[in-house]
Amino acid sequence: MRVLVTGHQGYLGTVMVPALVQAGHAVVGLDSGLFADCVLGRTVEDPDTLSVDLRDVSVEQLAGFDAVIHLAALSNDPLGALEPQITYDINHSASVRLARLAKEAGVSRFLYASTCSVYGAAGEELVTEDAPLRPLTPYAESKVRVEDDVADMADADFSPVFLRNATAFGFSPRLRADIVLNNLVGHAVLSGEVLVLSDGTPWRPLVHAQDIASAFVHALAAPVESIHTRAFNVGVESNNVTVAQVADAVVTTVPRSTLRITGEHGADPRSYRVDFSAIRRALPGFEARWSILDGAQELYREYTARGLTQDSFSKTFTRLSRLESLRTSGRIDNAMRFVDARV
C-alpha cells in the first residue's frame, strides 16, 4: 500500500516508519517538524516528507494514498492542561478535518492512534473496549471526540479503525523522556535515583513502541470487515502494573540505583487496567512481545551507549520543555506554528 504517516518525525513515528517499510509499504511522512531534530545519537533517515502543519493539509496532498496512519498530536497531559484550546484545535478539530479530506481524496483506510487513557479512573477491573469512557484530561477528551466524529464518516469506501495504545515505553531515536518508564530509567542513569513523585499506587497499562508499530502493520493487513470502525486496546495484560512496580523494574536494571517514592503529587486519579484480548482475536499474528523489564534494559543500554545528558533529558526530550523553548526563542508562535520560512 501507499501509506501516509502523520507525525512521522515523532517518538512513535520514527519507530513505525521502518516497520511499515519492512512490511512492504511505500511510506510518505507528514510533519511540521516540531521534534524533527530531537534525536539521541546518530541522525534518522526519514521517508519522503510533506513538511506541513496538520491544520493546513489539503485534499490534493492526500490524493493517491491507500491509507492514512494518523499519529500527529500534541502529546501528553501536562501540555494539554497548559494549552487546552490548542490541544483541541490540533488533536480534535484538525484530526477530524484530516479524516474528512482523506475520505474526499479517496483514501480507503484511516488508522487513528488513540489512547487507553480514555478510560480514566476505571478502578482495578480489566476494562474492554466497551467500557464507559471517562477521560480526565484535554488530551484524552480530544481522543474520544475524534473517535466519535470519524466513526460517523465510515461507509463502504472509507474504513476507520481506532487503536487505543497503552502508555508507550521503549527506545526511539526521537526519544520521549516524559513517559513513565523512559523517565524513570533516564533519571536513574543520570542521578542514581529512581524518583517517583506520586504515591506509586496508580495502575497503568504499558506497551513498547515497537509493539505499537506492529499493531498498525497488522491492522493494515487485516480484512476491512474485521476491523471496520472498531476500537482496539493495544498492549498486553502482563504489562498492567502500578507505577511502583515500574520503578522496581528500573532499580533491578540500573546498577547501584536506589528507589525514592516521595508521594508529593498524591494518588493520581488516572488509574486503570486494560483487557487486550480483542486485538489478538481480530489481528491473528499480532502479539505485544516486550515486557517492562525488557524495555528498561533496552533503555539503559541505549541511554548509556548514546550519551544521554541531563540537559537533553530535561529539555530536548521533554515535550513541554521543548515547545516552551521553541516559543521563547521565537521559532514558533502561541498557536504552535513555525514562524520561519522552512515550514
Image (cartoon, rainbow, N blue to C red):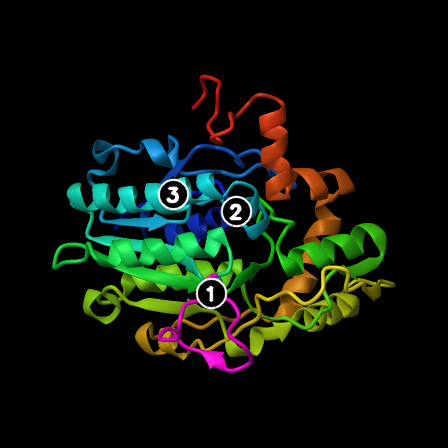
Between 229 and 136, the residue placed more toward the observer is: 136
Residue occupied by mark 2: 80
Q: Which residues are magenta?
A: 120-135
For residue 134: magenta? yes
Query: Which of pointers 1 and 3 lies earlier in the amino acid sequence?
Result: 3
Task: List the single residue furthest toward the bottom.
Answer: 125
Pointer 3: what residue?
6
Question: Tag 2: Cα neighbours inside 10 Å, few (<14), some, or many (≥20)?
Answer: many
Q: Amino acid at mark 1?
A: Cys
In the rendered view, does 219 fall on the left or right side of 200?
A: left
Q: Please report the residue visible at 18 percent of the width from the left and 57 percent of the height from the top.
A: 154
Q: What residue is shown with label 1?
A: 116
**Spatial CA span between label 1 and label 2:** 16 Å
From the viewer's side, name the closer residue of 109 and 222: 109
Q: Is residue 23 visible?
A: no
Q: Nearer the viewer, mark 1 or mark 2?
A: 2
